[in-house]
Image (cartoon, rainbow, N blue to C red):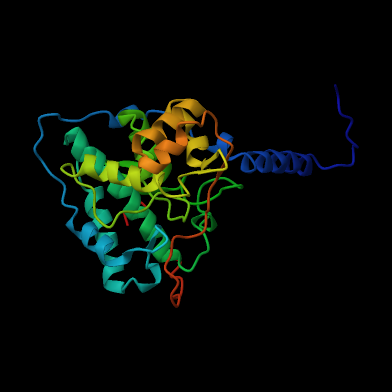
């Protein structure tokens, strides 16, 4: 089949129109837009015998001060309440992580390092950009149709510029292959698993991950059975490959972390009816402060 084009049309206009159609198609299909786990081999290096630890005390203090468990079961962050001193403390913590020789750590220390770095950078982005309605409004990723901050190189570790996408999809997911990673990295949205009010460490890693998994799975935004139909978070659709690679795999994963009532409801379920996700910012509603319009960057 061929398409005849009026010679008077500008080729650039046509190219733009095609790109726009492709972009709309991608945005309309979140499952297709979800990044695949593609290993960045550079970060496989580790030292199993290492006893070196990374200090996450500053991050832990900030989390305990600004993360608030709401009575609806969704943790929220007081972004607008951040003091200048605490914002500086957050950036200083991120800079301290940038100076860590992460390749020389053992696997558990590395895992905690990457999770905390991801979440700290995400929080810094929101604090610096606040007020915003959603993290997707921080369109700093490369590309004309960029959506959100995830593709932007924001920190430098061991001489490598790294983005949030790199941390999640090129380091954490392909190296550890643990579906609970999706409960640990936080995208500052109401639909996202809760940001816990404590820093992850090598010693609390397993408890942290299991707590995060159970909390999300047993909240309606994680999984909900009504009239015999299962509705789940879109996370399970976007990243189905990490949860067994099928709807059956997702359901088995849910059963593993479900409480008694949800597990009983899942016994008669063999398919997923629908999914959903709320991109609204996970903020506490207080008087907003003025946006500072300064985004962290490599070497900051």
In the picture, the quarter occupied by the C terminus is bottom left
Q: Which residue is at a point 50% across and 53% down the rendered structure image?
A: 140
Front residue of this view, candidates 218 and 147: 218
In the picture, the quarter occupied by the N terminus is top right
Residue 23 percent across, percent down from the top left: 65, 42
Residue 263 visible within the image: yes
Spot the residue most to the bottom: 287
Q: Which residue is at a point 54% across and 58% down the rendered structure image?
A: 137
Residue 122 found in image quarter: bottom left
Answer with left or right where residue 226 lies relative to residue 103: right
Q: Is residue 244 above or below residue 186?
A: above
Front residue of this view, candidates 263 and 111: 263
Residue 48 found in image quarter: top left
Answer with left or right where residue 48 lies relative to residue 26: left
Count of numbered circles on the image: 0
Residue 225 percent across, percent down from the top left: 51, 42
Q: Which residue is at a point 43% across and 65% down the rendered structure image?
A: 283
Answer with left or right where residue 19 lies relative to residue 216: right
Residue 184 percent across, percent down from the top left: 33, 45
Q: Which residue is at a point 51% across and 51% down the rendered structure image?
A: 148
Residue 184 visible within the image: no
Q: Is residue 83 above or below residue 254?
A: below
Front residue of this view, candidates 60 and 222: 222
Answer with left or right where residue 64 lies relative to residue 150: left
Residue 206 percent across, percent down from the top left: 23, 39
């Amino acid at each position: 089949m061929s398409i005849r084009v009026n010679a008077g049309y500008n080729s650039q206009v046509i190219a733009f129109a095609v790109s726009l159609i492709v972009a709309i198609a991608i945005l309309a299909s979140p499952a297709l837009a979800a990044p695949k786990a593609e290993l960045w081999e550079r970060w496989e290096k580790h030292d199993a015998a290492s006893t070196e630890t990374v200090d996450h005390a500053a991050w832990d203090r900030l989390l305990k001060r600004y993360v608030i468990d709401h009575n609806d079961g969704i943790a929220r962050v007081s972004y607008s309440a951040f003091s200048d001193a605490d914002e500086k403390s957050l950036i200083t913590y991120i800079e301290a992580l940038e100076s860590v020789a992460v390749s020389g750590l053992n696997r558990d220390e590395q895992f905690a390092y990457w999770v905390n770095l991801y979440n700290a950078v995400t929080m810094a982005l929101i604090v610096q950009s606040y007020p915003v309605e959603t993290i997707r409004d921080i369109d700093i990723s490369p590309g004309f149709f960029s959506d959100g901050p995830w593709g932007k190189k924001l920190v430098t570790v061991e001489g490598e510029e790294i983005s949030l996408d790199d941390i999640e999809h090129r380091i954490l997911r392909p190296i550890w292959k643990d579906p609970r990673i999706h409960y640990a990295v936080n995208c500052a949205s109401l639909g996202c698993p809760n940001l816990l009010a404590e820093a992850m460490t090598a010693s609390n890693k397993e408890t942290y991950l299991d707590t995060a998994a159970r909390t999300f799975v047993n909240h309606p935004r994680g999984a909900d059975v009504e009239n015999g139909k299962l509705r789940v978070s879109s996370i399970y659709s976007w990243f189905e490959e990490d949860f067994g690679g099928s709807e059956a795999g997702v359901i088995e994963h849910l059963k593993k972390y479900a409480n008694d009532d949800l597990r009983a409801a899942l016994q008669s379920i063999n398919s997923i009816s629908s999914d959903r996700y709320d991109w609204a910012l996970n903020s506490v509603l207080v008087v907003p402060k003025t946006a500072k319009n300064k985004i962290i960057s490599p070497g900051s």
